[in-house]
Image (cartoon, grey):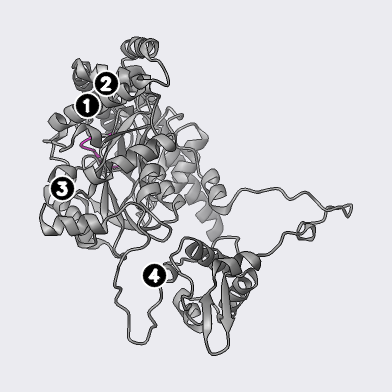
Amino acid sequence: MNRRGVRAQIRFRVGARGMNIETARSEFQPTLPLAISQITIAADSPVPIYEQICRALRMAISAGELPIGTLLPTSRELAQALSVGRNTVVSAYSRLVAEGFVVSKFRRGTRVAAPLQAASQAPVFHASHCEASADGDIADPLPDIGFAGQRALDAPDLSETAALFGINAPDNTLHPRGVLQKLIADAFGRTHFGSSDTQSDWRRYQAAVSSHFRQARGVRCEPEQVIPVAGVCAALDLTARLLLDPGHAVLVEDPAPDEVRAAFQSAGARLFPLPSDMSGADPSKTKSPPPRLIYVSPSVGFASGVQMTAMRRTAVLQSARDCAGAIFEFDGYAELLYTGSRLAAIQAQDDEGRVLYYVSFKNTLGPHMRVGALIVPPHLSDAFARMSRHAGCAPECFILAAIAEFVETGQYAMHVKKIRAAYAQRLKMVVDACQAHLPEAVIGEPRGGVHLTLTFPAHISAQHVTATAVEHGLAVAPLSRFSLRRQPPNVLVLGFGAMPDRLIEPNIRRLAHLAREKVHQSHDRRDDAGN
């Protein structure tokens, strides 16, 4: 390995606290500690701003990102950096002093306190802190849903449970139910749980996956680099647990599915959009601090279905090198590419060990087969394997054994050809129906995947069309829902994976009717307002 690769591995450690990033600042601004410069304020949160500052500083102190004795910025400096009132920062500092996290002395500033001091001065819970009920008794303190959790619950459900135009929804009727049922039953009968059989099934799955994707996608890996995971959410969670600390910057290809943003936000990371166009993600158009992790989907971009060009793939890899970061390469739709030649994965170009490559069997073997594989660099394989077992991220061993046999015997490769042809035919039917019933919309025909976009004329709001369509059982969504940046308000995303062929034409016709009906209602309201 060259000297540059050695340095990269030394800098790229699992769970490393912070990054040695030199940020250019103006000569009039003080240099703030990294953990403080990464504090973000959610203006729409019901949590008071001073409490948001307190929580961020408590987390940084507890995580060791602000060591004992660290001098905090003055209230004026922090207020200027966060664009908040000075009194707000003064309130936050006063609260932290009372809790023992910091100490404040005249002429010496505010510094991080020692742990024993923080523990001894921590606030004690009293019943008087509870709200009184109507009859004067003290009400039992009950936990409530957090702000971020409530926001996620309030979002429309676009999961695969919605059959008509559902997002990320493959067709359950196209999958080899009978063959898999027999393989799983046989594997379950052979398995003696708690013995070495489970390790044998794990290793067999690793060998089958590494062999298949070396041939199909040019991936460079050994079996021990393959980490079995129960779907993309498990893979993202595993990656966030091991590579991200609160405050780390993450570049996310934009737009991206909901679960991607949710996983990284839950880890406390700061998300920045990586703009994508018809050539894929473009690192030259992003504005962010040096990212710890870059998420991309080069084979089939969401939701346009475009394939990232070779030049862009090289640029993404170079961006990761420049900031000593990692790449999460999502390749869940690699088997469903309908037109054009397949380009080699970014992982195949990685000589340093920066790319984590995810593949999924969900879209080819059925929505209930939440099985995938995260192929990690060699120096991370042991940590990811141990964390996968500890956190319960891996599927059951007999499931792994059944899929391994399905792949080893060549049945999987034959099945992929069959299902790819079925989805390609379904895409053509959807495009034909849209051209017939929605001639005013521009159809973004994907090269792969199970989604497409419809761009309506500027006066038609995708948000309004979505609200009406969802009421009638059509699970479409505006493109803006999946984006961190401002998107055109007239672009609609629909999934065709789970749509039976016989229902395509009538439901496209129904969507067109609902869209035009919404436009007429908007015109009528404007006319009434004018009168």
Q: Nearer the viewer, residue 512 or 253?
A: 253
Mark 4 secondary-structure assignment:
helix
Q: Residue at x 27, y 26 (%)?
A: 203
- Numbered mark located on residue 34 in the image: 4
- Numbered mark located on residue 207 in the image: 1
What's the distance in space between the residues labelled 4 and 2, CA to CA?
Answer: 46 Å
**Quarter occupied by residue 176:** top left
Q: Earlier in the sequence, mark 1 or mark 2?
A: 1
**Marks 1 & 4, CB-CB < 8 Å contact:** no
Q: Earlier in the sequence, mark 1 or mark 4?
A: 4
**Marks 1 & 2, CB-CB < 8 Å contact:** yes
Front position among marks 1 and 2: 1
Q: What type is the residue that disc 3 sits on?
A: Asp
In the picture of the structure, the residue carrying the numbered disc 3 is 350
In the picture of the structure, the residue carrying the numbered disc 2 is 404
What's the distance in space between the residues labelled 4 and 3, CA to CA?
Answer: 29 Å
Residue 167 visible in the current orientation: no
- Numbered mark located on residue 94 in the image: none
